[in-house]
């Protein structure tokens, strides 16, 4: 199964944000173990680095980047993909870009903590805890 993992889930892990850390870490572990194919939207990489570095150390930010780049596919959009994202009937352009990455990468779900923001996404959103309860037994 291929899923796009929203930046908020990755930040939960690398910043150990409670109470979300446990479920998000389990999703990332499934990707790291090769039991799940995870896609990280390319446009989120700089945000991930910046926020981890801001709240921790440069070494922590570099370790987060290394882990994502080692275990996740990186989902890119070309100009046409960005145009499709812009035209999606979603309230937030960044969420629309994540949805467009999910669509072009063949993801079946977007694992996010902002599920309501993906109500109009071409690829449905699911919270990490719900993803685990519905899909983890298959892994």
Image (cartoon, helix red, strand yellow):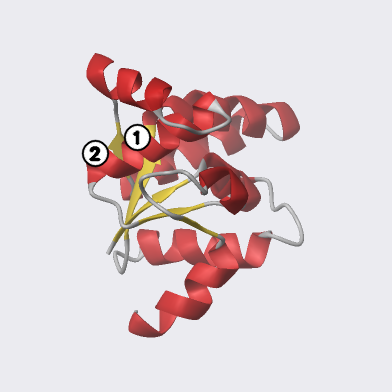
Look at the image and tell me whether residue 44 can be seen.
yes
Q: Is residue 121 left or right of residue 18?
A: left
Q: Residues within 10 Å of mark 1 (few under 14, many from 20)?
A: many
Label ID, residue 104: 2
State the quadrant of the N terminus.
bottom left
Q: Quadrant of residue 87?
A: top left
Q: How many circles with numbers are drawn on the protein?
A: 2
Which residue lies under the disc numbered 1?
100
Residue depicted at x 51% and y 40%: 63
Front-lying residue, 23 or 96: 96
x, y percent for residue 102:
33, 43
Look at the image and tell me whether residue 78 can be seen.
no
Front-lying residue, 86 or 2: 86
- How many angstroms separate mark 2 from mark 1 (CA)? 6 Å
Q: Is residue 136 left or right of residue 71?
A: right
x, y percent for residue 127:
56, 61
x, y percent for residue 76:
29, 28
Q: Quadrant of residue 58?
A: top right
Q: Is residue 134 left or right of residue 82?
A: right
- Per the image, label 2 sits on a secondary structure element best described as helix
State the quadrant of the C terminus.
bottom left
x, y percent for residue 126:
51, 60
Above or below: residue 89 compared with residue 79:
below
Label ID, residue 13: none
Residue depicted at x 47% and y 44%: 120
**Looking at the image, do the residues carrying marks 2 and 1 touch, with CB atoms under 8 Å apart?**
yes
- Per the image, label 1 sits on a secondary structure element best described as helix
Q: Residues within 10 Å of mark 2 (few under 14, many from 20)?
A: few
């Amino acid at each position: 199964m291929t899923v796009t993992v929203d930046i908020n889930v990755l930040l939960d892990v690398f910043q150990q944000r409670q109470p979300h850390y446990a479920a998000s870490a389990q999703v990332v572990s499934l990707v790291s173990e090769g039991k799940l194919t995870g896609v990280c939207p390319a446009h989120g990489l700089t945000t991930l680095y910046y926020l981890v570095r801001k709240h921790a150390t440069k070494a922590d930010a570099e370790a987060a980047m290394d882990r994502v780049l080692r275990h996740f596919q990186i989902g890119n959009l070309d100009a046409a993909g960005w145009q499709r994202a812009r035209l999606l009937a979603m309230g937030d352009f960044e969420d629309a870009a994540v949805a467009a990455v999910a669509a072009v990468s063949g993801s079946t779900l977007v694992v996010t903590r902002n599920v309501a923001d993906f109500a109009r996404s071409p690829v449905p959103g699911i919270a990490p805890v719900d993803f685990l309860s519905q899909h983890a037994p298959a892994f």
